[in-house]
Every structure is written in structure tokens, then in C-alpha cells.
Image: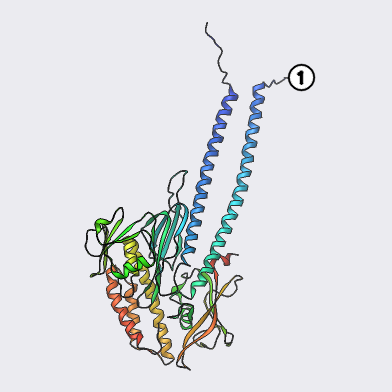
Amino acid sequence: MINKRALEFNFAWMFALIVGAAIIGLAIYFAVSFVKTGNSANNAELGKELGTILSPIETNLEITKSPTPITFPTNTRIYNDCDLNGNFGTQLISVVAESSIGDKWAKPKNPTKLSNKYLFSSSIVEGKAFYILVAPFNMPYKIADLIIMWSEKERYCFVNPPNDIASDIQDFNLKNINITENARECVNSTKVCFSGSDCEINVDSNSKSVKRKGEKTVYYDDKYGNSLLYAAIFSNSLVYECQLKRLMKRNSELSSLYLSKSLLLNSQGCGSSVLQPLFAQYATKTKGMNNTVEIRSISTLAQGIEDENKILSCKVF
Amino acid sequence: MKTKYYHVKYSKAQLKIQQMAFVLVAIVVFFSIVALFYFAINLSGIKSNYESLEEQKTSEMVRKLSGLPELRWEGCSSCVDLDKALLLKNRTSYKGFWGLEYLSVEVVYPKVESRECDKGVYPNCNKITIVGNNNLARTTSNYVALCRWDQEIQGNRCVLGKINAAGEFNSTR
């Protein structure tokens, strides 16, 4: 005999199931939204903190230094972006912490905007610890401190670097950078060649240029230190070019400021009639920089200004 | 005419549905209130964190201001070039560059006439306001040396001064 008893699926059950599912669905949706909002707020806060941290690590002195690494509690991505609009351009920094809910890496939002910082790195740097090298950039007067950054996940192998670069690496105990005489000794690292052209990054000290594989050649100048060379090695060509243009914009404003100072000193009976047109020419040249190769002619002009300033009794800088 | 009364009979299931509906509505209302509280606390936390970060940024900025190429006196890490400070005043190209609501340099010692500097009275004045005005409550200060080339002594002269600055968040308070 067939048992005709069955589970009674009445209206109460149906109602409870439908409304229950709706409530649970809404609860999950809101929970995920809360977490995403929380993550966004946290990322914005981290970006702001990073912007604040970058101020004290800059140097007031004329020396290069390597402060303690910046560490984050979780795996983090730092997005280094640069905007050329305005008189000084803008450094844009976004920080995104790895998330275990939803997308692993959220899209960078609300970047911290800084007009007077210059961060040289890859466009996206990922890791928990970030190593920093701060180097003053002079041409011929101080223009800014360059902040050069790489992560614990990036390893570099410098093949036959010049003595001053090698001693910098050893003196500052720069992490994740090895020095070798033979490129074959470089394992699992980005090879940086200072003589030769079969590495991922090739430095040509004759033409004063740096070429990354698959990227355009960028130019540096080392008359006033190695800061631009380090910047060109550790950042990709797009970041380097944009930041160098920003530096030249600031250089142009500084040149115009020094021109005014020279005129003020002139009115006090101490000035140079030769220096003023040089400052004016320098301001125009640096403001209109289109390509990094122009750094060579800018550097020659800077040398002329420095020579003229040296012989003054009341120095402009 | 005789009025007819109809007795509506509610089944047990119908009563349970009503009961359940009320419970569900109550749960939704309860969680909404909890969420509102959570957001209120969380938002106030974000705001205070933002203000604290801005305050930190300003105080770090003030510590480093004398080292900025626009203000620094070459060859001295905590000296400000008074000539450059004067020339920066009213320079429109630097608008927004500092990230500050207020920035000034002030001569502390030796005492000079208490008035705002401009090209007409310089150097017989004690204050150069580079950014904003002086009506902000919370400014951070740092003592520095203020240096310039002095026509009288035909050489460089440095006096004791201070830099005053206030972050942009102060203006919203």
C-alpha cells in the first residue's frame, strides 16, 4: 500500500522561506558593502599616512640617506601616479591593501595629492615592506629631495657599478641590491648593467641614459650627484619622465625666485647683471622641457649659473 | 430587520504568519538601528583620524619648512632666507603648493618694529605672511634662524625667528 502522507508545504513555510532568503540576501549584500566601504576608508587612510610619513624622511641636509623601511601589516600595493597640470604638477599616491573578501585588489581610489613630493618607483609597487632612498637633487641649487622606493619583492643585481654607486649601496646597506662583477651571478633579480647592454636595465654613462627593456630611453645628469641616476634605475620610464618634468617646473619657479632675489640684491648695491639674464633663460628652458634628453642642455645652463654665482660677494644661493 | 453577524474564523496558520511577519519586521528594524549606530561611530572615527593625520602632516611640514628650497638659506639646514620669504609673498604661482592654510615667518630677536613686511619697509619689519591671514586658532611654530645679506655690514646677518603654519583642515573648524 502506498503511503500518502507527505510533508505539508503550506503558505507559512513558503512565506518564511521567501522572506528569510530575502533578509539573508540583504544581510550578505550589506555586509559585503560594509567591508568594501571599510576597506576603501582604510586604503584612503593608509594613503594619507604614507603622504605624512614621506615628509619626515626627506633630508634637510645635502646628503643621501636610507631611512628605515615603511612596513604595512598586510600585503599592500602602492600606486605611484603623476599629474603634470598646474605650476608644479601633482604627486598622486594611492594605497590598496590586499583583501580576502571580494576582489583581491580593489581599484585605487581617492589618491593623496602632494605638490612638493617626488616619488620614483614602478607604477605599482607591491609588498609588505618598502625600502626607501632619499637623495637631494641639485641643479645647481637644491630643487627637491627625490624619494626612491622599491619593495621587498623587487631584487636588483648591479653589474660592475661605478665606485660611488657601489659605496652608496654598501654604506646605506640598501636592501635587495647585490653587487657583482658578472651578470651570470645574478639569480632571480633584475640585472642592472653599467657596461654592456644585455640586462633588463642598461645604464650608459657616456650618453648618461638608462634603458629598461621594452621601455623608452631616459636621460639623467650626474654633475650634481647621483640622485637622477638612482631615480631612472628604480622607476619605469613613464614615472621618471613625468617626475623629471615636474622637477623642472619647480626648477623654473625657483629660477624665477632667484632672479627676483638677484634684483633685490642689486637694489641693495650687490648683485650681478650677468646672472639675471641667465636665470631668465634657465626659467624658460626648464618650464618647457618636453623630453628627458633636454636635461643635458639644462645642466650646461645650470653650470653657467653656478660659476657666475660663485664669484659674487653676496651669493644668490 | 434583523442584523446578521458574521464570525470571521482565523486559522492557526494565519495567526502564525502574522506573528512571523511581525517578528521579521522587528528584526529588520532592530538591525537597521544597529547599522545606523555603527555608521555614526565609524564616520566620527574616520573624521577624527583625518584631522589627526592632517595635524601630524602640518607639524612634520613645519619641522621641514626651513629645508624647503623655496625658503632655505644655502649651507644651513635650519636657516630661512628672509629675502626669499619676502619675494614669495603674494607670488600667485605658489598658490596651493604648500598645502597649508597659513604660513608666516616672524623675527623674534632682536626686536624690530612690529609690522608686516613689504618691499617698501623691508627689512625694518618683523613679519612676512606668505600664505593666508592670521585669524586661525591653531598654528604650529618652529624656531629658526632668519638670514639675509645686510647692506650695512656688507655681509650676511642672521637673527632669531620662527615659522608659523596651520594645516588646511583648521579652516573648517
* Residue neighbourhood size for the residue with mark 1, other residues' Cα within 10 Å, grouped as few (<14), some (14–19), many (≥20): few
- Residue under the point 35% across and 86% down: A310
Question: Which quadrant would residue A23 be assigned to in this image?
Answer: top right
- Residue A208: x and y in percent read 26, 69
The residue identified by callout 1 is: B3
Judge from the rendering whether residue A89 lies leftward or rightward of residue B35; answer left or right.
left
- Residue A174: x and y in percent read 38, 63
Q: Is residue A163 visible?
A: yes
Q: Relative to residue B71, is residue A118 depicted above or below?
A: above
Question: Which quadrant would residue B3 be assigned to in this image?
Answer: top right
Q: Is residue A110 visible?
A: no
Q: Classify the position of the C terminus of chain A by image quarter.
A: bottom left
Amino acid type at circle 1 is: Thr
Q: Chain for mark 1?
A: B
Q: Residue furthest right?
A: B1
Judge from the rendering whether residue B161 lies leftward or rightward of residue A209; answer left or right.
right
Judge from the rendering whether residue A298 lies leftward or rightward of residue A36; answer left or right.
left
- Residue under the point 51% across and 53% down: A42
Question: Which quadrant would residue B124 be assigned to in this image?
Answer: bottom right
